[in-house]
Every structure is written in C-alpha cells, then in structure tokens.
Image (cartoon, coloured by chain):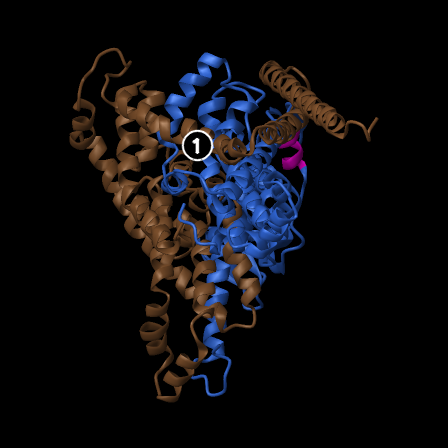
Chain colours: A brown, B blue
C-alpha cells in the first residue's frame, strides 16, 4: 500500500497533523476562555468576599499571580498557532500590552481626565475654564502652600545632600562603615506615618509645670528655657521641624548613592593630589565633588520630587494646620474634605507640571544612554 | 581609599563625627522603642531616657521634727542647716545627704534622702497587648479602675499583608514580560512606548486618584483589598519595567541567540532562561514595592477610606495619632508593630535594595 501510493499516505498524514493542530488550537482557545471566565468570576468573588482575611489574601495572590501567569501562557500558545508572520507581530503584543494597558489606565489616562475635571466647577457640572487655576495662583492659602513647598525643596534637598555627602565621606574612612551606614539607612524602611509618630514623641510639649516627656523640650527645659510647641510656633519656620523628619528618612538614600560614587573615584588621582600636598578638604571639594556631580544631580532630583509629593508627614504631624499645608495635603483637603473637585484637580495638575522638568531630564538621559 | 599612610585626616575626628551623627539618627527610633515597653503611667510621667542608669534621691529616713524647735528660725537636721523655706526646697548636708521638709510648717515631716543609682526600669508588654488585642481592657490598679480602649492592630496587620503581597507579585510578573518584550523583541513604536514608561516614572500619583476612584465607585470596588493592589500595580509598573529592563537588556546576547537557534520560542526563553537569570533584579524591585506598598498611606486612605475591617496599618496608626494622640503607650507600641515587617525585610535583603537604588532611577 505504502509502496503503491506514497503521496496519498503522506497527504493523509499531513491532514492528520493539521487536524491535530487545529484541535489543539481549539482546545487552547477554549481553555483560554474558561480561564478568562474563571478569573472574571474571581474578581467578583474577591470583591464581595466575606471569607476570613487570610483566605481572601491567599486567594487574591493565587488569583492575581497565578491567573496572570496562565493568561500569559494561554495567549502565547494561541499566538503560536497563527502563521509565523502573524506570530512575529503578535508575540510582542502578548508580552508588552498588559503592562501598557495598566500604566495607561492608572497613570496616563487619569492625567487627561484630571485635567478635564480641573476645567469644571466643584461638582463637575459646569465649565469654568481656567478659573480654578486662577484660584490656585492667587488665593492666599494657596500661596502659603507654595511657599511651604519651596521651603521643603530648598531645605529638604540641601540638608539631605549635605548629610548624605558627609556620612558617605566619613564612613568611607571608618572601620565601622557598614554599621554606620545601616543606622543611617534604617529610617528608609519606616513608613512616613510611623516616622511621624516617632517625631511627635520628640517634639511632644506639655504644660511648663509638668515634666516634659518630649526629648527636645526636656533639653530646652534642662538648659533653663521654656517648653515650645515646635510644630505650631514661629511660622513659617515651624515647617523646618517637619522637614527634619524627611531629611532623617532620605539621608540614607543619598548616602548609599554618594558612597557608591565616591568609591568609584579613581584612587590614583587622589593619591597624586595627596603627593602634591593637597589637604583632605581640598581633595574632597576639588576632586571628589566634581567627579560625583552626576550622582549629586540625580539625588537632588529624586529628593526634590519626593519632597514635592510629601503628604503623610504633614497630615500626621499637623494636618496642614499652623501654616504647614503643602501641595499634596492641599489637594487632599480641597478634593476630599472640601469636596471641590475642580480645585482639587487643578492642584493635582499643578503638581504634575512641577515634575515635568525632571521628566524631560529623565528622557534625555535615557536617550543618551540608549540607542534603541 | 584614605587608609594609606600619612593620611592627614585624624581617624579620631572621623569616628567621633560619625558616632555623633549615628546617635542623632538612632535616638528618635530608640526613644519610641524604649517607650513601647514602659508602663503607661511611666510614659506619661517621665521621659524615656530616665530608663538609663542615673542617680536618684531615695528617702532613707523619715521623722517628725522636734515640736520644741523654732520653726521660724534656722534649723539643723542631720547636718543640714537652713530656714523653713530652704528646707522645703531641700538642703544638702556636707556628707552628701539631702534633707527635705515635706508638708506645712506646723505638721510637716522631715525626709533624709541619699543619692542611689536607679535600679532596673519597669518594663511591660501590656502596650503591645492592648494594641493588638482589639478589645477594651479593664485595669484595676492602685485605687484606680479604668476601662481603656485597646486597638485592633492585629487585624490591620493582616489587612496590610492582604494588600501588599498581591501588589508585589502581580506587577513583577507583568513588568518582567514587558521588560523582556522591550529588550529582546523588535516591534514598531517600541521606543516611543518605552519613553512613555520612563516619562511616567515621576508622575505624582495624586493625578490618578480621583478618576480611578470614580471608576471604582461605579464598579463597587472601593473599600476592597483589590482596589488598593490593582492601583499599586498600576502605579508601580513604570519603575518595575524600568528596573527590569535595565537588567534584562544587559543579559548576554549569545545566550539568547543560542536559545533561538535551538528553536525555543520567546515564551520558553523568557520562562526558562530570562526569569531565573533576573532573580537579583526581581528581588530588588520586590523589596522596593514591598516597602512602598506596606508603608503607603495615601493610596489606602483614598481607596479604602473609612470602611472598617479593611484598614491597613498605616491608616490605623494615623487614625490613632488623630483620635488618641495622648495615648502614648498605644502609639509607641502601634508604631513599632507597623515597622516590624519592613525592618526585617529591609535588613535581611538590604543588598538587593541597595542594588535597586544604585541602578539609577529617579522616582
């Protein structure tokens, strides 16, 4: 039989292969649909779940992590059944599209929607043009807010960088480098709310006739002074007491980056300078600082962005009272407390505008490094 | 670097400055930590630093002054001499004792005190118990009985975990796929889309809260765990893609090409080769995202709001600051409970965290 008609046999084998292939494709498609349906159902199960928390959490992890992996797997299998030309086009879509969809929905699109909302009044019912922006830039309470953000940026960034540099330079010469770095770094692991609690305890103030339990006031009283309500007095300088908290938290970050940069400065240059009789301070300021300028710029940008968005510390420490409001707390107060959607949105857009220079800088750096 | 001979920078100076800075950095946390183990009344009546050994006046003797003594003139007890007013303040005798007049002029008593080292401070786990138990605790102490409200931090702890773990796992997976796509696949618009990711790195998430919240309200999602971790997935993705791209794009080209020659599909290369090789980068992002989500307050505040039973640790803690700002015994213990897990993660995986930081991101 085979000898008589080899072509026909090959033909039928070919057909069988194609059929199997088709069956597999249908099976994959079906399992894809089933998986999608199960995941979709899981969404409602999770949303309305009354199960114990740990069960819900576990289910969420499996649903999210596992479900996502299965969807990727099935989508990829499906793509592999398409002709190779389509396969080349579709595989990148499977890999990249989910992440893009998330980022577009959670970040890019909201920027547009918030901008549109900022052109409407407090409940979004009538178009007011730029009126909200005029409020943002003229109302005295907004001007106080901007002034505070300037204070945050100027003092927050400069103190963080000075302390970061100081610790990085000193630790580099010390035997206790790792211990010192761990101590300075530790506050980075703490939430801003937790840091607020820690520092509230430092700044605690009580009646002058009572024993002071806040460290700062205890020192002041021991030196013969009057206890002070640090975060409420002497506006606008009370902001500095809040800024200290963020300097305390961010110095570790600056230190780590500076430390890595300082270690990368070639030793022979420093040795040569030392042989020429340059003092340590001269070496630091005229060799080390210029060599790590790039890192200083990066750290400054990061700290500035961080301080621009500062929210938790202010909310926990003062709630924005005593002239300590910043853009992010003002956004929260206007939108969620005063229920002024238009003004809240306008403030968020202003916040976005302030980070655009950094955005451009990031893109430039990236283009320089990358030849995609 | 500067450990060479003839270093003109005295080591003593370096170490002293470093120690001072380290102490400054450590003291705030230390104060809270020590306080969290002190009894409630101690926290309110003395500073936490009094647990350090110090000398205190201890009464060794107490007696009524002789009724015949002239209380308007100068008196001498145990070698200490002074008028009534001076004795009321306490007068030190030459041998280091202090004599103090307690009470009024007519019916007062005399105490003789000596300076002794303070003993071991009182410690307690009651604060942690009160904060975790979630019920009201009745204490009956010295003639004072008070019901004091506890906090339900253990509940919030579980909530934090339920929010954080999915918010770490899901973006890692999505970002790894995307980073591989950007690094090793060729498709139109690749550069433009990746530039969008880089640009979104610094976008303040305040911009997203309101529109997303209104969608959540329509979907009845607000007040659920899912609302928070879906949002954190979206907000964390740009950094995740960026960090993982930096790593995955530097994997050796030869390995990839060898795998392709062997007929492996992209999916297989990714799953079998790239993902295992990228463990350090995955770990460094995981720590970032873990710390960020666990410590986040704003996103949870907006999307969970005041729904009880779902609130995460930062929210409970912030609420406690607002509603019971004077209950220091609860705040100190609560503060430490919220820091426990991040500190453990941080110190055990510090290496990966530092690597992620130095990977050069501006966020």
Return the x and y of residue A18 as percentages of the image width and height: 68, 25
Q: How many numbered markers are drawn?
A: 1
Q: Is residue A297 left or right of residue A316?
A: left
Q: Which residues are magenta?
A: B126-132
Classify A43 as above or below B330: above
Q: Is residue A154 left or right of residue A128?
A: right
Q: Residue at x 39, y 85 (%)?
A: A272
Q: Is residue B340 left or right of residue A324?
A: right
Of all residues, the one furthest to the top in this rendering is A125
Asked whether A265 or A185 is in front, the reply is A265
Majority secondary structure in the magenta region: helix
Return the x and y of residue B53 as percentages of the image width and height: 61, 58
Classify A300 as above or below A350: below
The answer to whether any part of residue B111 appears in the image is no
Q: Is residue A275 left or right of residue B176?
A: left
**SS class, disc 1:** helix
Of all residues, the one furthest to the right in this rendering is A1
Badge 1 crowding class, 10 Å Cα cut-off, few under 14, some 14 to 19, many 20 or more, is many
Q: Residue at x 64, y 47 (%)?
A: B273
Asked whether B159 or B259 is in front, the reply is B259
Q: Residue at x 49, y 68 (%)?
A: A171
* Residue A323 picture quarter: top left
B290 inside magenta stretch: no
Return the x and y of residue A355 as percentages of the image width and height: 30, 42
The answer to whether any part of residue B362 appears in the image is yes
* Residue A298 picture quarter: bottom left
B128 inside magenta stretch: yes
Classify B139 as above or below A248: above
Q: Chain of mark 1?
A: A
Return the x and y of residue A342 as percentages of the image width and height: 26, 21
Residue to which mark 1 is pinned? A103
């Amino acid at each position: 039989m085979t000898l008589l008609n080899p072509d026909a046999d090959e033909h039928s084998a070919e057909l069988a292969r194609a059929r199997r292939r088709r069956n597999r494709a249908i099976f994959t498609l079906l399992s894809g649909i089933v998986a999608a349906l199960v995941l979709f159902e899981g969404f409602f199960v999770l949303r309305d779940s009354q199960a114990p928390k740990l069960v819900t959490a576990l289910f969420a992890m499996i649903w999210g992590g596992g479900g996502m992996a299965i969807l990727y797997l099935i989508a990829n299998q499906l793509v592999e059944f398409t002709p190779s030309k389509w396969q080349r086009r579709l595989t990148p879509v499977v890999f990249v599209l989910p992440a893009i969809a998330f980022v577009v929905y959670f970040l890019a699109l909201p920027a547009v929607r918030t901008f549109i909302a900022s052109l409407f009044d407090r409940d979004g019912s009538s178009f007011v043009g730029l009126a909200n922006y005029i409020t943002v830039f003229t109302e005295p309470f907004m001007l106080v807010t901007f002034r505070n953000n300037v204070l945050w940026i100027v003092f927050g960034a400069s103190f963080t960088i000075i302390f970061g540099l100081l610790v990085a330079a000193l630790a580099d010469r010390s035997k206790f480098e790792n211990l010192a770095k761990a101590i300075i770094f530790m506050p980075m692991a703490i939430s801003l709310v937790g840091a607020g609690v820690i520092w509230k305890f430092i700044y605690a103030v009580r009646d002058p006739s009572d024993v002071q339990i806040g460290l700062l006031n205890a020192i002041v009283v021991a030196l013969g002074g009057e206890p002070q309500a640090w975060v409420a007095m002497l506006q606008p300088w009370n902001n500095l007491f809040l800024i200290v908290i963020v300097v305390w938290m961010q110095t570790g970050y600056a230190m780590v980056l500076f430390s890595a940069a300082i270690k990368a400065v070639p030793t022979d240059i420093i040795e040569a300078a030392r042989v020429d009789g340059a003092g340590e301070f001269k070496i630091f300021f005229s060799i080390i600082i210029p060599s790590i300028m790039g890192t200083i710029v990066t750290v400054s940008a990061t700290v500035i962005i961080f301080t621009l968005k500062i929210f938790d510390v202010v909310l926990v420490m003062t709630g924005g009272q005593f002239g300590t409001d910043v853009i992010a707390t003002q956004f929260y107060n206007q939108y969620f407390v005063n229920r002024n959607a238009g003004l809240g949105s306008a403030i968020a857009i202003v916040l976005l505008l302030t980070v655009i220079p950094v955005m451009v800088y990031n893109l430039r750096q990236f283009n320089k490094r990358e030849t995609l | 670097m500067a450990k060479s001979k003839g270093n003109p920078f005295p080591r003593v100076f370096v170490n002293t400055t470093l120690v001072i800075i380290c102490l400054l950095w450590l003291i705030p946390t230390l104060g809270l930590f020590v306080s969290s183990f002190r009894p409630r009344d101690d926290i309110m009546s003395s500073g936490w630093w009094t647990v350090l050994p110090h000398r205190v006046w201890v009464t060794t003797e107490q007696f009524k002054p002789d009724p015949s003594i002239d209380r308007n003139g100068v008196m001498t007890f145990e070698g200490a001499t002074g008028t009534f007013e001076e004795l009321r303040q306490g007068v030190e005798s030459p041998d280091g004792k202090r004599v103090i007049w307690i009470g009024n002029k007519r019916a007062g008593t005399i105490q003789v005190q000596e300076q002794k080292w303070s003993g071991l401070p009182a410690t307690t786990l009651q604060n942690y118990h009160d904060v975790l138990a979630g019920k009201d605790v009745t204490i009956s102490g010295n003639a004072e009985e008070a019901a004091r409200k506890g906090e339900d931090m253990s509940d919030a702890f579980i909530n934090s975990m339920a929010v954080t773990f999915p918010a770490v796992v899901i973006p890692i997976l999505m970002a790894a796929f995307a980073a591989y796509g950007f690094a090793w696949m060729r498709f139109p618009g690749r550069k433009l889309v990746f530039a969008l990711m880089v640009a979104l790195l610094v976008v303040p998430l305040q911009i997203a809260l309101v529109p997303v919240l209104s969608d959540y309200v329509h979907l009845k999602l607000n007040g659920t765990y899912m609302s928070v971790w879906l949002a954190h997935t979206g907000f964390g993705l740009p950094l995740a893609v960026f960090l993982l791209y930096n790593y995955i794009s530097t994997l050796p080209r030869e390995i990839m090409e060898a795998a392709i020659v062997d007929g492996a599909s992209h999916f297989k290369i990714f799953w079998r080769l790239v993902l295992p090789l990228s463990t350090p980068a995955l770990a460094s992002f995981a720590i970032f995202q873990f710390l960020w989500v666990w410590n986040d307050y704003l996103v949870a505040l907006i999307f969970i709001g005041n729904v009880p039973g779902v609130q995460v640790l930062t929210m409970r803690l912030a609420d406690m600051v607002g509603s019971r700002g004077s209950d220091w015994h609860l705040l100190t213990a609560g503060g430490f409970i919220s820091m426990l897990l991040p500190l453990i993660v941080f110190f055990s995986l510090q290496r990966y965290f530092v690597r992620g930081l130095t990977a050069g991101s501006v966020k």
